[in-house]
Image (cartoon, rainbow, N blue to C red):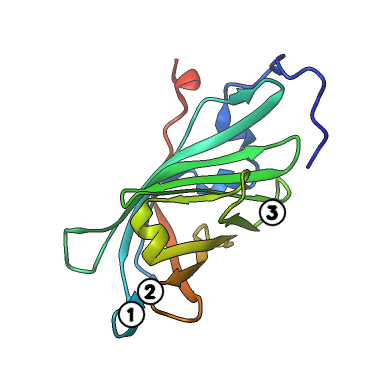
Amino acid sequence: MPDQPRDIYTEPDADPDTLKHLGPLRRLAGIWQGTKSLDVNPGPGGTRRQDYVEHIELQPIDPQTNGPQLFYGLSYVMRAVKPGEVETYHHQVGHWLWEPATGRIIQTLSIPRGQTALAMGTTTADATRFTLVAERGSTVNGICSNPFLEEAFRTDRYEITVTLDPDGTWRYDEVTILQVAGRPAPFQHTDGNRLHKVGDPTPNPLMRR
């Protein structure tokens, strides 16, 4: 991790045009749908496999600073349903953040089952593939769960790999390591989907003004 600057208050000059400074996240900006999906999760009889239909919006936000630290990013809302159904199968909100000075990527995520996480990785501005990781117990890229999930389906690790394909689509592969109550070995919960663009991003508020 880079040394902390002596001046922790002075903010850098930031370009209001977030879309120009998203590095490898630029290709994610917009509205997407995906049906090439698979969720492999634990069930009472063993392992369950479920297809799902996903809709996700990733919209640019204004530049964000922590004193000298500068992020450009996207806010996102994701909703998934089972094919042919309307009930929400999975709902997730959060941010993708790019720090040009360090090459760091951060994903924050929250789900309405009482769980949040912050995953982190490093890459280059022109990368077409990158991986982020969150670990239970970490204070910088950690996982926090409500008491029931912590006891019954404890999440020890979350890893997501994003691949930007030449045809304009992108895909993700997630691996979440769970310690399920009553099972002696950790369970590898996986999710993955390929997303096709159905709408352009909306400029961030500073640019709209």
- Dot 2 crowding, Cα within 10 Å, few <14, some 14–19, many 20+: some
Identify the amino acid type marked 3: Ala
Identify the amino acid type marked 2: Asn
Residue 149 position in % (x across, y down): 37, 59
Q: CA distance from mark 1 to mark 3?
A: 34 Å
Instruction: Please state if 164 lies on the left or on the right of 124 as rendered.
Output: left
Instruction: Report if the CB atoms under discs 1 and 3 are less than 8 Å apart.
Output: no
Q: Is residue 121 above or below residue 18?
A: below
Residue hosting label 3: 127
Residue 48 is tagged as 1
Q: CA distance from mark 2 to mark 1?
A: 5 Å
For the point 37% across and 66% down, the residue is 152
Foreground label between 3 and 2: 2
For the point 83% across and 34% down, the residue is 3
For the point 42% across and 80% down, the residue is 183
Secondary-structure class at tag 2: strand
Instruction: Kindly give the residue lying farthest to the bottom in the view shown.
Output: 45
Instruction: Report if the CB atoms under discs 3 and 2 are less than 8 Å apart.
Output: no
